[in-house]
Image (tube, rainbow, N blue to C red):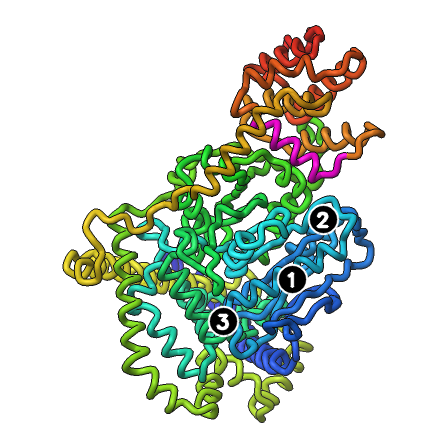
Amino acid sequence: MFRDNPANFGNALPALFASALEYLVDTGQRSVLFLDVMRRRGLQYRKHLLETAPHVLDYEVELIDDGRKLNPPVNYALVRVAAPVGTEIDIRRRPFVVIDPRAGHGPGIGGFKADSEIGVAMKAGHPCYFIGFLPDPVPGQRIEDIAKAEAKFVEEVIALHPRADGKPCVIGNCQAGWALMILASLQPDLFGPIIIAGAPLSYWAGVRGQNPMRYSGGLLGGSWLTALTSDLGGGKFDGAWLVQNFENMNPSNTLWTKQYNVYSNVDTEADRYLEFERWWGGHVNLNAEEIQFIVDELFIGNNLAAGRIKTADGQVVDLRKISSPIVVFCSKGDNITPPQQALGWIRDLYSDVDEIRAYGQTIVYTVHETVGHLGIFVSGGVAKKEHSEFSSNIDLIDVLPPGLYEATFEAKSADTPNVELAGGNWIMRCEQRTLDDIKAMGENSAEDERRFATAARVSEINLANYRKFVQPWLRAAVTPYLAEWMHKLHPLRMSYEVFGRNSAAMATVAEAADKIQKARKPAREDNPFVAFQEIISKNIVNLLDRWRDSQEAFSESVFLSVYGSPALQAAVGVEPGQEASPKQEMSFEHRKRLEARIAELKSQIGVGGLGECVIRGLLYVGMARGMVDERSLEALRRARASQTDSRLTLTQFKSIVREQFFMLLLEPEASLAAIPQLLPRGEDKRRAGLAAIRDVLSASSEVSGESAKRLDRVTELFGLTAEPQAKAS
């Protein structure tokens, strides 16, 4: 263009020069402001370290119990969360208890923002409590000691809410999720529904080419490196190393995007960045015994779902003993706890849905499409949708018949039927699923399972050799002074410390930033140099992402080759064709109890009244749909409220639902045939009962197809004539 008409070049040159000058001024100012953000980040970090109980909760709290005063003592505490002004709490609603993960960061992520797990639970009217921890563990504390403390905390919450309609709903985020599952299996009577968000439970599971973190233990030769790190820390494991592992998962974000986003949007992103960094940089410590248990028993040994973990008094941790509904929330965008690791334990424990029901368990899962690991806890969109719906509909989850369900969410619209029966902006449904739905997400082959079993055995051998030949002299050589300096010189800590000191250089940056804020001149969005800067940034991200992908592919190839070696497998005792993680057989005691319960239920088929008949009829028709909608539960709740003589608690109602559900599974025809004998003689009461069934069924959708046929049969059993409208539907 310039060659054909040189005048164009002459006309464009001043504009180009002006854009370059504007960009140079802008980038100079941005650079100083960015350095000032790093300075504020460092000062914030140092201030956070000086706090006795640093946390990032966005709420006022009241200490209820200090775990350091328990026997055995632990560095955990229970606090009551004060509701914000304008939020009404109903003391009759079940309390929520949020347990934060101790995975390198400090506590508070579950209440980090107003739109958080705690925030949405309080908006739904639930009292809220929080279990957090101090930066340093009590010397000698173990994972088992923490579980005992958390059990006591939950008992205290129950005692504080004697009128609550249901036991506490407890949320375990990330690492707190597997700890909650262990506790719930040991003391199942303490809990209402439990929600585990982004929590790994099946540690070997994954899909080739997508889940690289599961190979880490094998590639490092096992957990001897964990023991070494703890010994270098004088018996403490620095949580900054766990945070470093997370950082290494996404080098483009760690090395470039996170900082570039602040630099390029320094006028708007600084506060948000500093708010997040207050939590991300709040590193905490673990005892050597704690981290060794986590790595050996869980991440490398994969012993949780296999039932190979025992407490000090010999109790076997069997997740099948959990009697509370279990809600599992995971995401396809989570490369730290992918859906396979969050849900694979279900297939590890059960052969089919009937076996889930045989243990009386209700499992509900939902899989987000895109959100990352941290987004499960801190994303406002997730809080307003998934967590809000779980909080609002926790009673629906609690009364679901045993089985496997997927929670789905549909946005409300003007065309949504009976929209007034659903709170919030979404409608939650629990749809029946089978183990094939879990399997379809991806699983290991038998050969890959043996590879992981080989890695676990190699880890045991390497750890034993380390403890015998290296650990004694290393522990003798590491003084408290040396351990303290190694702690301070961790690369992540240094990245905060270097900008957080009151040096002359930082004072100059602060002064310059203050002046720039008053004379800020950002470049226009259409500035060509800004566009070029964005292109360079994207190229850097793409380059780092390709490097990460190549490293992950290489690491996977090495792991599969090394631990797939028949010679290595034979050397460590892994036999060809051996099942690495065989399913636990149902115990003789449980089978005996199950048979007795089945006989008891069959004997009670002919016992009951109108309430049992209504629930039996509802379940019979609802089974044809294969899903439960929150609007149906609200319609049922209103029907119960309209009956002034109804004194059923939620727990009693749940018990009746389960009994009637199992009766229909065991003896469907006999259960239906018994209805006429159980109904009252008065036609008005029978008609009211049938109307309640119709109202509940029609609350979510039109009654049609097989559901309509079943409803007609229930109508006949009630001794009434089917209404023409119902038949037409």
**515 and 202: which is toward the camera:** 202
Label 3: element kind:
helix
Label 1: element kind:
helix
Cα gap from disc 1 to disc 3, whole angstroms: 65 Å
- In screen coordinates, is 477 left or right of 59? left
Q: Position of residue 628 (x, y in %)?
A: 60, 31
Amino acid type indicated by mark 1: Lys
Instruction: Write down the residue under mark 2.
Output: 94
Amino acid type indicated by mark 2: Arg
**500 and 4: which is toward the camera:** 500
Q: Position of residue 120 (x, y in %)?
A: 69, 51
Instruction: Write down the residue under mark 3.
Output: 20
Q: Counting residues from the N terminus, which is met first, the one under dot 2 or under dot 1?
A: 2
| Quarter of the image with the N terminus in it | bottom left
Q: Counting residues from the N terminus, which is met first, the one under dot 1 or under dot 3?
A: 3
Label 2: element kind:
loop
Q: Position of residue 234 (x, y in %)?
A: 45, 84
Residue pushed farthest left? 567
Up the image or down, 381 lies above or below 486; here it is above
| Quarter of the image with the C terminus in it | top right
Cα gap from disc 3 to disc 2, whole angstroms: 62 Å
Q: Counting residues from the N terminus, which is met first, the one under dot 3 or under dot 2?
A: 3
C-beta proximity under 8 Å, tags 3 and 2: no
Q: What residue is rendered at 45% in x and 87% in y?
A: 483
Tell me the number on the disc at residue 152. Answer: 1
Which of the two discs, 1 and 3, sits closer to the camera?
1
Residue 156 part of the magenta-drawn span: no
C-beta proximity under 8 Å, tags 1 and 3: no
